[in-house]
């Protein structure tokens, strides 16, 4: 297939725990995987390979560094000397899961925070910036289309905006219509609907720091966050993948093919 100015990122599927975060060792599998976008990379793998889509992803666990946050999204529960007293329990470093399980018993030093930033955050975001430049050079296009791929609990928890609500299969978010054009948003929604998914828009997610940082349609950067319900392909209690994942993967391939064909 011909190259198009279109790529995907997967910032939360990594499961590797760095030596700098020993508090994440020896957690039970369900707790350690509570908020990881487990299997998202596997589910989209066939789409990415068969459509020759450029991919930016990480091997690192989001509890160590959340790549959809900013380095200043820290508070004193996670980092000694942080400017914020509280408010970022699920920030750059997660100190609490969405089930209110405590992850960090004692805040890390600011030096550890800086080392984690340099180890995980800076390389990933350099890859994102480099991808925009590379696709512009290779395709001759000034406008680049970018999907940031995630997964979500099928039910909102008490830590979410929609506690107890059953969510759509797919939630598309554009930072309240700021991160992309209406045309790209409508194309992506149509793609997932055509593939057989029930699609929500900007609820309960409006987009994260990636859509905020890179979604600049006036500068030729069109970004959408795509959340997928974990109930479609995994046991949300045990965090094990279900046989149905192959069906879901096929539908995702239809969606991404639709997007690429109609850009």
Image (tube, helix red, strand yellow):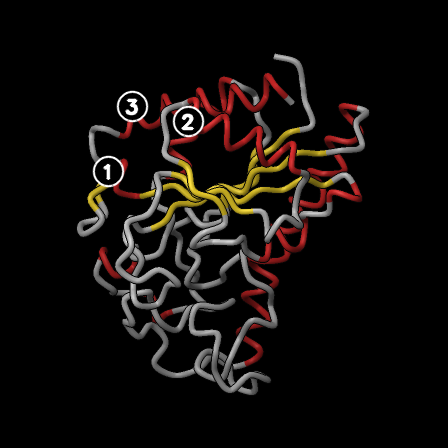
The mark nearer the N terminus, 1 or 2, is 1
Q: Which residue is mark 1?
A: 241
- CA gap, disc 3 to disc 2? 9 Å
251 sits left or right of 82 in the view:
left
Looking at the rendered image, the disc whose residue lies closer to the viewer, 3 or 1, is: 3
In this rendering, is residue 250 above or below 152?
above
- CA gap, disc 3 to disc 1? 12 Å
Residue pictured at 67% horizontal, 19% vertical: 3
Q: Are marks 3 and 1 in contact (CB under 8 Å)?
A: no
How crowded is the residue under tag 3: few (<14 C-alpha within 10 Å), some, or many (20+)?
few
Residue 203 coordinates in the image, percent (x, y): 45, 52
The extreme top residue here reads 1
Circle 1: element type: strand
- Please state which of residues 89 and 61 is positioned toward the viewer in this rendering: 89
In this rendering, is residue 70 above or below 244?
below
In this rendering, is residue 220 above or below 135?
below
Circle 3: element type: helix
Residue pictured at 52% horizontal, 20% vertical: 258
- Please state which of residues 63 and 158 is positioned toward the viewer in this rendering: 158
- Report the disc number at residue 247: 3
The mark nearer the N terminus, 3 or 1, is 1
Looking at the rendered image, the disc whose residue lies closer to the viewer, 1 or 2, is: 2
How crowded is the residue under tag 2: few (<14 C-alpha within 10 Å), some, or many (20+)?
many
- CA gap, disc 1 to disc 2? 16 Å
Q: Which residue is mark 2?
A: 252
Quarter-of-image position of residue 105: bottom left
Circle 2: element type: helix
């Amino acid at each position: 297939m011909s190259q198009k100015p279109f790529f995907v990122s997967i910032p939360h599927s990594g499961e590797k725990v760095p030596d700098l975060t020993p508090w994440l060792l020896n957690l039970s599998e369900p707790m350690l995987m509570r908020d990881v976008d487990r299997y998202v990379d596997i589910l989209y793998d066939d789409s990415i390979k068969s459509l020759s889509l450029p991919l930016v992803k990480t091997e690192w666990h989001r509890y160590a560094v959340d790549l959809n946050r900013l380095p200043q999204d820290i508070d004193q529960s996670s980092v000694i000397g942080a400017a914020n007293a509280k408010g970022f329990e699920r920030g750059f470093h997660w100190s609490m899961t969405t089930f209110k399980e405590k992850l960090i018993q004692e805040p890390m030093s600011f030096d550890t925070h800086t080392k984690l930033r340099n180890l995980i955050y800076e390389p990933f975001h350099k890859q994102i910036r480099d991808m925009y430049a590379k696709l512009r050079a290779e395709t001759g296009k000034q406008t680049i289309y970018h999907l940031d791929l995630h997964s979500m609990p099928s039910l909102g928890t008490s830590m979410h905006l929609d506690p107890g609500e059953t969510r759509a299969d797919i939630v598309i978010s554009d930072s309240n219509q700021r991160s992309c054009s209406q045309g790209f948003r409508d194309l992506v929604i149509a793609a997932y609907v055509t593939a057989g998914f029930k699609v929500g828009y900007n609820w309960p997610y409006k987009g994260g720091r990636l859509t905020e940082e890179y979604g600049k349609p006036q500068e030729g950067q069109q970004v959408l966050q795509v959340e997928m319900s974990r109930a479609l392909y995994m046991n949300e209690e045990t965090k094990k993948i279900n046989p149905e994942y192959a069906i879901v993967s096929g539908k995702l391939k239809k969606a991404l093919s639709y997007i690429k064909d109609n850009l």
